[in-house]
Image (cartoon, rainbow, N blue to C red):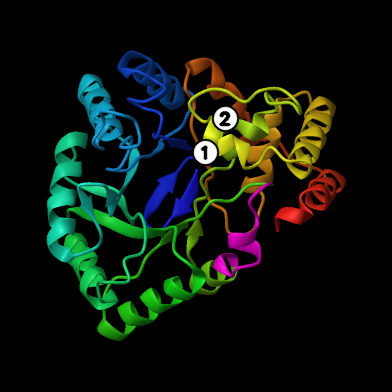
Amino acid sequence: MKKLATLRVSPLCLGGNVFGWTADQNTSFQILDAFVEAGGNFIDTADAYSSWVPGHRGGESETVIGGWLAHRSGHPGLVVATKVAKRPTHRGLRPSNLKICLDGSRRRLGLETIDLYYAHEDDPDVPVAEWVGAFDAMIAEGAIRHYGLSNFTAERVAEVIAVAEAEGLATPVALQPPYSLVHRADVETCGLGEVAEGNGLALLPYQVLAAGFLTGKYRPGEPIRGARAARVKGSATPEGFAVVDELVAIADELGVEPATVAIAWTASRPGVVAPIASASSPEQLPALLAAAEVKLSRSQVNRLKKVSATFS
């Protein structure tokens, strides 16, 4: 287990974006059961999941997770994170909106207290002190334990911390940026890694498999199909496929799946506490979970660093 503020979390966080989307309720329950049985305890979702699906409004993932928690008749030791600000019908960080959204997330999840509550995106139209004050009040009321920031720039993270400290309010404990071998810049070049290290913030990266591109299932010249096709195409460049080739080579050396190596690389980066990865079927889980047991050699890390340099 890893330490995250006052929480103890598994080294892999299970992403809930697929629940109610590419994984129906029954499959989602099987995935969640398998994750917990394998020792996982950290689950990530958002009130916006899966609003991008025609006919969905957001909250579908939280509803599935809440149904699973109720089916299990308890959740001892589980750590659940969700997010606010991107649900199409309730966008932004206005304190009045935060209260409505928090109540909705707690109801759908069936939780009195949410362990980690993220601002899913920045809201420059609301003064930082106002929405940070709202998060601080949620902590004081016992509605959430901690809060984090997702999709914020390094400059805004630094501003949030400065305002919170000046106002005597709770500070964030975690950052959730995209971070993978084909998306290194936000953390390594644009300052998120530095601001996290300087302020003791945990990095909990998402898109560590680049929407499945880094699993190795896509090859040059072949059509890209499926629910994530639009997200995958941005990585399907000659430089991206060169990264996949190196992942496949190292995976063969280690006797594991390319996805395992990709997650292990992100997990090994400074400040990373638990990468977030999702599975659309229970059969996909073992490759994700195996990353916690894989130790990449210095040579292998350098090979991956070199081949992915264009993305840093």
Residue of label 2: 289
Whichever of labels 1 and 2 marks the residue nearer the N terminus, that label is 1
Q: Residue at x 34, y 70 (%)?
A: 171
Amino acid marked by disc 1: Leu
Magenta-colored stretch includes residue 189: yes
Q: Residue furthest bottom?
A: 166
Asked if residue 247 lies left or right of residue 8, the reply is right
Q: Is residue 9 visible?
A: yes
Using the image, tell me which numbered label, if any, was put on residue 292. none
Q: Residue at x 47, y 64 (%)?
A: 201
Q: Give the x, y percent position of residue 235.
A: 65, 41
Number of callouts: 2
Residue of label 1: 12
Q: Give the x, y percent position of residue 90.
A: 20, 51
Magenta-colored stretch includes residue 293: no
Mark 2 is surrounded, within 10 Å at the Cα level, by few (under 14), some (14 to 19) or many (20 or more) other residues, namely many
The Cα atoms of the two marked residues, 1 and 2, are separated by 7 Å
Magenta range is 182-193
SS under mark 2: helix
Q: Is residue 110 visible?
A: no
Q: Hey, which quadrant is residue 147 in on the image?
A: bottom left
Residue nearest the observer in this picture, 3 or 244: 244
Q: Give the x, y percent position of residue 163.
A: 33, 81
Amino acid marked by disc 2: Leu
Asked if residue 140 lies left or right of residue 179, the reply is left
Residue nearest the observer in this picture, 163 or 40: 163
SS under mark 1: loop
Q: Give the x, y percent position of residue 105.
A: 20, 43
Q: Residue at x 26, y 83 (%)?
A: 167
State if disc 2 and disc 1 touch (CB < 8 Å). yes
Q: Residue at x 44, y 36 (%)?
A: 15
